[in-house]
Image (cartoon, rainbow, N blue to C red):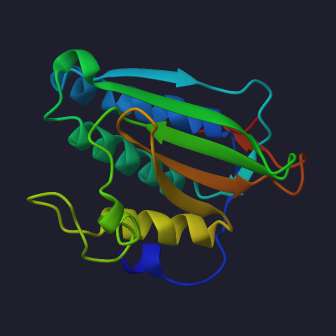
Amino acid sequence: MQLLLKKGEVQGHSVCINEVVQDVLKLMRSELINQNVRADFKLARNLPSVTGDLVQLQQVLLNLVVNACDAMADCDRSERRLLIRTGIENEITAVIVSVTDRGHGIPEEEKARVFEPFFTTKAKGMGLGLSVCRTIIAAHRGELWATNNADCGATFHFTLPIAASDKEPVITNNGLAQ
């Protein structure tokens, strides 16, 4: 935990964020089936790589997916849909990832606090997941925020700056550099 929260520059490699999404969905496949959650993804083609710690970025996305599933636990099974999108943000300076659920959304009075350490909306939550996620994304020089959807549910978004050099090897889902 200390290593995750330790200040300093992230020592990383060039990472393909689309592969991070695919890896997390593979990892979560059984849990998604057990919770009757249909997961879809819309991954931008030819997405530039980002510089970062592959494991930390997987942890962020994993936490957001788990939270989305938890948010839909009380919903009708037909409404338990998760959508993960990737794209380009800020005129080609950052990659954006969005995790959308169809739960009950974030109450307006709690929206500003969801990233505070030890604040939770879950009955058995510790209130550390989103705080740690925000710390990891900030260490990667990105931003993490949440919005309520127009119809129902919430979307958590994070941006990461595009890798400074395309010459760096891109780490793929099998751990090999390309």
- Is 160 placed left or right of 85 in the picture? right
- Is 55 placed left or right of 154 in the picture? right
Q: Quadrant of residue 101?
A: top left
**Residue 168 image offset from top left, x and y in percent:** 83, 50
Q: Quadrant of residue 74?
A: top left
Considering every residue shown, the one lying at the far left of the view is: 123
**Residue 87 image offset from top left, x and y in percent:** 70, 36
Please state which of residues 107 and 36 is positioned toward the viewer in this rendering: 107
Q: Quadrant of residue 65?
A: top left
Quarter of the image for the C terminus: give it.
top right
Please state which of residues 171 and 84 is positioned toward the viewer in this rendering: 84
Circle count: 0
Residue at x 40% of width, y 32% of height = 151
**Residue 68 is at least partly visible in this image:** yes
Q: Is residue 85 above or below residue 139?
A: above
**Residue 96 image offset from top left, x and y in percent:** 66, 45
Considering every residue shown, the one lying at the far top of the view is: 78
Residue at x 81% of width, y 51% of height = 90
**Residue 16 image offset from top left, x and y in percent:** 68, 39
Q: Is residue 128 above or below residue 107?
A: below
Please state which of residues 110 and 14 is positioned toward the viewer in this rendering: 110
Quarter of the image for the N terminus: give it.
bottom left
**Residue 174 is at least partly visible in this image:** no
- Is 22 placed left or right of 113 in the picture? right
Residue at x 35% of width, y 35% of height = 152
Residue at x 48% of width, y 32% of height = 23
- Is 111 placed left or right of 96 in the picture? left
